[in-house]
Image (tube, rainbow, N blue to C red):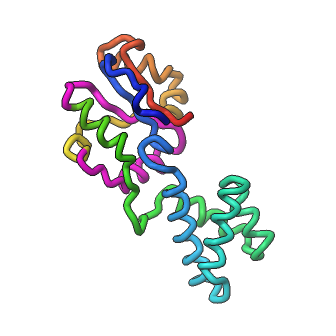
């Protein structure tokens, strides 16, 4: 994502969460760390370090959708623990803050100081996305955090609403006055 090419003549700027505000893997890998420690505690014989290393390799080489399946095949983890991983993914209390990309932090501050509107428009599970937002270290943008509204693409579409049209109406602008910053 190249922040330098973002036009500054719009009225409302919308930010996706994953890989725009911070690296999605920073969240996912902390969830894997928590799950691995849960499995070590629960089973008494699986080592958390081994599980974390394995989960990270599968995540980076094959994708997150293969992580639990790989755990089952390699470590014999029962299917019943998949629910624990899914629940953790949505509600994790992370040990470390998610660090807002510096260029995004600077852009948010700049937009607010130029009297622009800033919102989050994100895809995915709303509870999970809110949880991620809760764990972000906003840095200098923290002073504006309470002015940022959050919208969920999936929720709007479920209600048969086109997200961009809905937000334009909500902010009293035309859709062309919105700019959505999302990962490529």
- Vertical position of residue 136 compared to residue 85: above or below: above
Q: Position of residue 54 (x, y in %)?
A: 68, 70
Is 139 a magenta residue?
yes
The residue under the point 52% across, 71% down is 34
| Number of disc labels | 0
**For this rendering, which residue is in front, 47 or 19?**
19
User: Visible in this render: residue 153?
Assistant: yes
Q: Is residue 83 above or below residue 151?
A: below
Q: Is residue 104 left or right of residue 78?
A: left
Can residue 152 be seen here? no
Residue name at image x 41 percent, y 12 percent: 176
Residue 51, quarter of picture? bottom right
Q: From the viewer's perspective, tell me whether residue 4 is left or right of residue 66.
A: left
Q: Position of residue 181 (x, y in %)?
A: 45, 30
Quadrant including the C terminus: top right
- What's the residue at 40%, 56% (across, down)? 98
**As drawn, which residue projects farthest toward the front?**
4
The residue furthest right is 73
Residue at coordinates 71% horizontally, 56% vertically from top-left? Answer: 61
Q: Which corner quadrant of the image does residue 4 belong to?
A: top left
- Quick check: is 62 in the magenta stretch? no
Q: Residue 108 occupies which quadrant of the picture?
A: top left
- Expressed as whole percent of the image width and height from the top left, the position of residue 56 reads 63, 64
Judge by depth and name the residue closer to the eye, 171 or 118: 118
Position of residue 56 in the picture relative to residue 31 (left or right)? right
Residue 21: % across, % down: 41, 44
Magenta extent = 113-140
In the visual, does 178 lie left or right of 56?
Answer: left
């Amino acid at each position: 994502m190249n922040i330098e090419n973002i036009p500054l003549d719009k009225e409302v700027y919308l930010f996706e969460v994953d890989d725009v505000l911070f690296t999605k893997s920073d969240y996912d890998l902390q969830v894997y760390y928590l799950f691995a420690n849960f499995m070590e505690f629960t089973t008494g014989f699986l080592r958390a370090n081994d599980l974390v290393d394995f989960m990270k390799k599968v995540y980076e080489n094959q994708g997150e959708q293969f992580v639990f399946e790989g755990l089952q095949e390699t470590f014999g983890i029962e299917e019943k623990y998949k629910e624990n991983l899914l629940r953790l993914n949505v509600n994790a209390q992370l040990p470390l803050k998610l660090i807002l990309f510096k260029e995004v932090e600077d852009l948010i501050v700049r937009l607010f100081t130029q009297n622009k509107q800033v919102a989050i428009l994100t895809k995915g599970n709303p509870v999970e996305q809110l949880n991620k937002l809760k764990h972000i270290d906003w840095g200098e943008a923290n002073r504006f955090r309470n002015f940022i509204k959050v919208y969920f693409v999936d929720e709007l579409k479920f209600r048969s609403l086109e997200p961009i049209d809905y937000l334009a109406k909500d902010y009293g602008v035309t859709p062309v006055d919105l700019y959505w910053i999302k990962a490529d």
